[in-house]
Amino acid sequence: MTDLGRPGVVAELRRRIGRGGPVTFAEFMEVALYWPDGGYYMAGEPWGRGGDYVTSLDAGEVFAAAVTVQLFEMWRRLGSPGRFTLVEAGAGRGRFGLGVARCAESRYRDFHDALHVRLVDRRYGGGLGPEMDGAQAGDGGEGPGAKVSLHEGLDGLGTVEAGCLISNELVDALPVHRVVGSEDGLREIYVDYRQGRGFFEVAGPPSTPELADFLSTVGAGALPPGWRAEVGLEAARWIGGAAAVLERGYVLTVDYGFPAAELYGPARRGGTLRCHHRHRVCDDPYVRVGEQDITAHVDFTALSLYGRRAGLEVEGFTTQHYFLLALGILEELEEVGGGPGEIEKIRRNQAVKGLLMPGGMGSVFKVLVQRKGGAAGKGPLRGFSMRDMSSALHL
């Protein structure tokens, strides 16, 4: 390690800047998080209480059990096809996808027979893999052993005829451009390097007209002088790619963020970029490069609008709190006695409460479901039956 961060990451960024001048923040973020030699996500597993942050997936089987209820309903609305493919994007160890398979096996046998799980993560080529038993592992073919398969990208999936693509805290970690308003119009923030000073920001003309087009599309308008924002061009491309692999079914996105009207308002005039390191939050991405996570709040209006261009229609939008309550997550609470072995029940109950906590994961995290093809049903999906906030997206 160096004071700036992981040597491999720092060296690659210095090489790029030395060769071509300052880089966009999106390029800086891509290298910091995903460079094979020391990128944050490529160097280890950052989740859980021993890592840098806690996600819904750290609640394990509880979260998977609740979402399985929603997936079962989606399968029924699609006409109970003989094959339903669950694609988990950014799957990591695959705990969610495998948890869904286990839950379906115990509660919905017909659904389980149709269920095929595709775990997608760019790190699978580097040695990371899910924790599967022999009954779950398969080669992605059509036989009985093909319940689970691994893929490094969506482009390796082929066509999903019927199913659901789910991501949990993936979109917030996709590289973003950073822009700032000025008297002369929109400016982009680039990253430069100087020996003895380290990485620092410089402003310049936008690297692509797509930045202004994006802000116009989501209704953000011209940024006032000094106001900063993140522009998720990669997220827009990602939702298009997700739609492209899906012939009929749903895209379910769980992440923290806001509709555009809230995201680009006065309360967030400095942007939403944050770094996470050992459960602490900071706003300086130019230290500990490769050692800390870098995220930006998700623009759910952008996901909806760019998804619509690719054939996806919004089915529902709400907070994780209301989504999980509507799916009956409180039924996962267990009665706790005073005997030995009760510690696991206590942990399970704490996990449920953590997922629902107002002001915490329950309200900060949002759930967006988009639909493609003839999968419409009468009334809202169960996850949106308590509260649907789709009107806040201003589509």
Image (cartoon, rainbow, N blue to C red):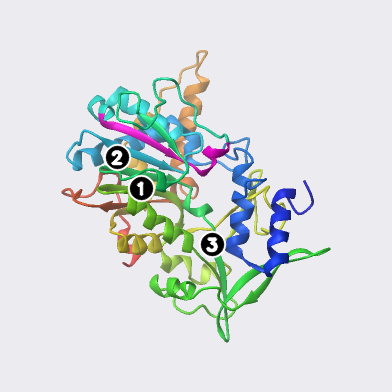
Which residue type does callout 1 highlight? Leu
Q: Nearer the viewer, mark 3 or mark 2?
A: 3
Among the two numbered marks 1 and 3 on one chain, the one whose residue lies closer to the N terminus: 3
Q: Is residue 206 visible?
A: yes
On residue 70, the disc is 2
Q: Residue at x 20, y 42 (%)?
A: 78
Q: Label 2 neighbourhood size at 10 Å, few (<14), some (14-19), many (20+)?
A: some
226 lies above or below 359: below
Q: Residue at x 34, y 59 (%)?
A: 307
Name the residue that disc number 3 marks. Answer: 176
Q: Label 3 neighbourhood size at 10 Å, few (<14), some (14-19), many (20+)?
A: many
Quarter location, residue 165: top left
Among the two numbered marks 2 and 1 on one chain, the one whose residue lies closer to the N terminus: 2
356 lies above or below 303: above
Which residue type does callout 2 highlight? Gln
Residues at marks 1 and 3 touching, judged by CB atoms closer than 8 Å:
no
- Percent position of residue 364, x then y: 47, 52
Q: Secondary structure at mark 3?
A: loop
Name the residue that disc number 1 marks. Answer: 252
Look at the image and say whether residue 200 sits in the magenta stretch.
no
Residues at marks 2 and 1 touching, judged by CB atoms closer than 8 Å:
yes
Q: Residue at x 62, y 38 (%)?
A: 44
Among the two numbered marks 3 and 2 on one chain, the one whose residue lies closer to the N terminus: 2
Q: Which residues are magenta?
A: 114-126
Q: CA distance from mark 3 to mark 2?
A: 31 Å
318 lies above or below 304: above
Q: Is residue 385 visible?
A: no
Quarter location, residue 333: top left
Q: CA distance from mark 2 to mark 1?
A: 10 Å
Q: Secondary structure at mark 1?
A: strand
Which residue type does callout 3 highlight? Val
